Amino acid sequence: MSLIKTDHIFLKENLANQEEVMHFLAAKATALGLSNDENKVYEKLLEREAEGTTGMMDGFAIPHAKDASIKEADIVIVSLAKAVDWHSLDGSPTEFIIALFIPDSEAGTTHLKLLSNVARLLMHQEVTKGLKEATTPAAIAALLNSKLTEN
């Protein structure tokens, strides 16, 4: 089974700031059937961000939401047409978002494992370079799925 699905990957989106990205993620989570409450998902994304930035290094962010309205653990990926400020750990703007959506019932297990695996992948330059150079959802899904199954 592939964890990363091509229909959950959105490339070169025109979103002007972090708030627009969070709204986009919440809307996509609902449209894809991951949740039945867009407002709750948006609220949870913001709550988590308020605890500390999810902006990592080299233009990547890993926002995440845990909520009872989320039906199953899943990932939505967005690349931006123009990088936005995310208060990242290295101060660089964010252009690539890997968002995690986790049901409350899996908060301590699936959430931590997914977050750990994704964060670990972003520490490898061949992965971050490959993601930034990918031009199709299929290329991104293939790269991440192959790396996630190695772990």
Image: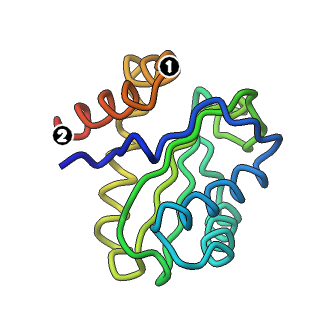
Quadrant for the C terminus, please.
Answer: top left
Side of 113 relative to 71 (left or right) = left
Q: Which is more N-terminal, label 2 or label 1?
A: 1
**x, y percentage for residue 83?**
73, 30
Q: Between label 1 and label 2, give the one nearer the viewer.
A: 1
Whether 110 is drawn above or below 134: the answer is below
Cα gap from disc 1 to disc 2, whole angstroms: 22 Å
What mark, if any, has residue 72 been given in the picture?
none
Whether residue 60 is visible? no
What type is the residue that disc 1 sits on? Thr
Residue at 78% in and 55% down: 19
Label 2 sits on residue:
149
Whether 74 is drawn above or below 98: the answer is below
Residue at 30% in and 57% down: 113
Q: Residues within 10 Å of mark 1 (few under 14, many from 20)?
A: few
What type is the residue that disc 2 sits on? Thr
Label 1 sits on residue:
135
Residue at 51% in and 43% down: 77
**x, y percentage for residue 132?**
52, 21
Q: Are marks 1 and 2 in contact (CB under 8 Å)?
A: no
**x, y percentage for residue 67?**
50, 78
Q: Residues within 10 Å of mark 2 (few under 14, many from 20)?
A: few
Q: Secondary structure at mark 1?
A: loop
Residue 42 is drawn in which quadrant? Answer: bottom right
Residue 85 is drawn in which quadrant? Answer: top right
